[in-house]
Image (cartoon, rainbow, N blue to C red):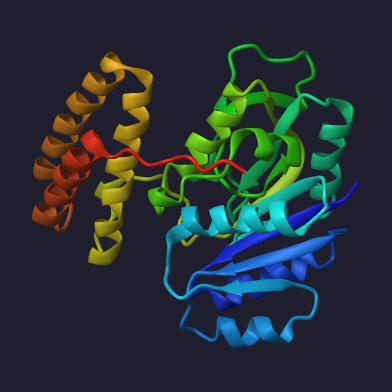
Amino acid sequence: MKIDAVVVTFNRLEKLKECLDTLITFDLNNIFVIDNASTDGTKEYLKKVSQIQSITLEENIGGAGGFNIGMKQFIENSDSEYLWIMDDDTIPEPGALELLSKSFVDNSKIGFAIGQVYWTDGTLAKMNLPVLARNQPVDSRIRCIEEASFVAVMFSRQAIEKSGYPISEFFIWGDDVEYTNRIVKQGFLGVQVMEARILHKMGENVGINILDENSNQSRVKRYFYNYRNRLYLNRKKGVVAVLRALCGRVIWGFRIMFSKNEFKRLKLSILCKGTLAGLTFNPKIEKC
C-alpha cells in the first residue's frame, strides 16, 4: 500500500521542521512540500532535506492553491494509491497513518479518511470539527462524515481522479469543506477514525470568528475569503441557503458594531466586500 504526503507551508519554518521530522518516521512513498513563497529560510532548508520533494512557488497562492498543486504532483508524478495532506503545523501521532490506511482496506467505498484532531492542551481542535453524516455505523470507532478540514486527510487516488482538484481560487477557508463534500457527492464515503490522533499546533484553539481578531489587521483582512467563499457554497445549496446566509451577515454586522472588539470599521468593510464578492464568485473546478 503506497501512500504519499503533501505538506503546504508558508513562513513557519520551525513548525515545518517538526512536521517533516514526524512524517519521515512514517512509511511514506513520497513527501511533497509546497512552499508558498516563504521568506523565512524555508526554501534553503528544504534543499537540505533529502527525503522530500519540494516545490517553491513564486508567490503565495494560499492553502487552497498549495493543496491544488500538491495533488497535481501526486496524480502526475507518483504511482501511489493514497495521498495524506496537511498544513505545516500538523503533527500526526504514532499509529495514525496505519489506522487511516486500514480503513481504506476495510471498505473500498471510502474516498477520504481523517483522524481525531486535538490542540496542544489535549482538547479537541475547534477549527477542525467535521460535519457528521446523518446515518452513523454501529462501530463507534469510525464515524461517517460529510465535510472535513485539510488537517491530515487521507484520500484515495480514485476519489481524486473522479472528483478533480481543490479550488485554488478560494485561496484560504472553505476549499477543504467544498472538496470533501464534493467527494461525498461523487458517491464515496468520508470517515473519521477516532483512534487516529492528530495534533494541530495552532496559535490558539479558536474557530473562525472575526470578533476574536483584535490584534492583527492583516488577519482581519483574510476574512474576505471566508465571507466570499462561504456565500459561494451557500449559492450551490439554493435560494433558501443564500437568504439565510445574507440574514446571518446582517446579524454579524450588528455583532461587530455593538460587541466589544477592535477594528470595527475594517471588519464591517471586509464583511460587506466579501459578501458582495460571494454573490458573483464563480470559480472553475479543475478535472484530473
x then y, percent, for residue 120:
60, 57
| Residue 104 in view here | yes
x then y, percent, for residue 184:
61, 25
| Vertical side of 131 occupied by 36: above or below | below
Q: Quadrant of residue 257?
A: top left
Residue sitting at x 48%, y 56%: 65
Q: Quadrant of residue 114?
A: top right
Q: Is residue 202 left or right of residue 242?
A: right
| Vertical side of 77 occupied by 157: above or below | above
Q: How many marks?
A: 0
| Residue 260 in view here | no
Q: Quadrant of the C terminus?
A: top right
x then y, percent, for residue 247:
18, 24
Residue sitting at x 18%, y 52%: 261
Residue sitting at x 68%, y 24%: 188
Q: Which of 228/117 is in front?
A: 228
Q: Which of 117/169 is in front?
A: 169
Q: Quadrant of residue 145?
A: top right
| Vertical side of 232 occupied by 83: above or below | below
Residue sitting at x 46%, y 83%: 39
Q: Which of 283/274 is in front?
A: 283
| Vertical side of 246 occupied by 102: above or below | below
Q: Which of 48/161 is in front?
A: 161
x then y, percent, for residue 190:
67, 28
